[in-house]
Image (cartoon, coloured by chain):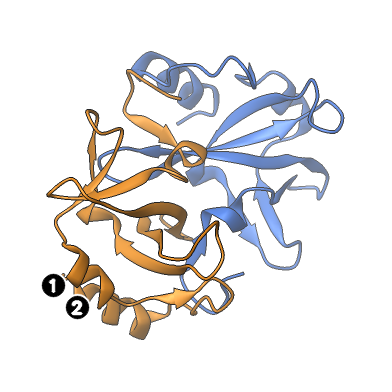
Chain colours: A orange, B blue
Amino acid sequence: MISGSHVISSDRVEGTTVYNAGGDKLGTIDDLMIDKVSGQVRYAVMEFGGFLGMGTDRYPIPWSMLKYDTSKDGYVVPLDKTQIEAAPRYASDAVPSYDDSYRSTVDKYYGL
Amino acid sequence: MISGSHVISSDRVEGTTVYNAGGDKLGTIDDLMIDKVSGQVRYAVMEFGGFLGMGTDRYPIPWSMLKYDTSKDGYVVPLDKTQIEAAPRYASDAVPSYDDSYRSTVDKYYGL
């Protein structure tokens, strides 16, 4: 773990729990989607549902929506379970191309 | 793998080979260091030396120095082995805090 600094390692982000504003666990971060040229993290991909990694879906969440909460040791997003359940998702073996069209769909869902 | 888009997953970046301009293998990317607030990837941490993960050192390389080469399926950095051998490094079990002082040391070594 990196502490006392402004950076965090991708190894540390992956596996971190995501909570809603009410403190309910929504899922865990499975992967990060990074702009190839700029190196900007665009989406944290949240794993939600399923059991022991089987049958789970992946939910791309715009990075700007995640706020780290040190008291929870996890990220908080201003979404409730109903919003997540209707959110853009894909199976772990069917990752979309993340082209402009897909990214626009995701961003619009979250009002960005 | 994400193709035909402008984003790449952290899972895909980790494990990718890093070459010098002459095409020699320097190491592989082990981790990414990300600005907590902005989500900007600041450093790719390259693994170099050792055998089967034992005794290797970690070298933070500023992200802006890495260029992806599709023909090599890896990143190319404008450094030779001598420059890497003298570069800032740490043991995998002694990760520094990446505070302003450490980051300044790394950036200055690479002329940034």
Q: Nearer the viewer, residue B62 or B14?
A: B14
Q: Is residue A105 left or right of residue B53?
A: left
Q: Residue at 40%, 40% (x, y): give it.
A: B34
Amino acid type, label 1: Gly
Q: Is residue B100 above or below residue A66?
A: above
Q: Residue furthest right?
A: B51
Q: Is residue A83 left or right of residue A6?
A: left
Disc 2 marks which residue?
A108
* Neighbour tally class for label 1: few under 14, some 14-19, many 20 plus, Cα within 10 Å: few
Residues at marks 1 and 2 on the same chain = yes
> For the residue labelled by badge 1, is the local secondary structure a helix, a strand or a loop?
loop
Residue A15 appears at what percent x and percent y? 46, 45
Q: Taking the image as drawn, is residue A40 in sight?
A: no
Q: Residue at 28%, 82% (x, y): give it.
A: A105
Residue A90 appears at what percent x and percent y? 45, 77
Q: Taking the image as drawn, is residue A106 in sight?
A: yes
Write down the quadrant of residue B65 in the picture: top right
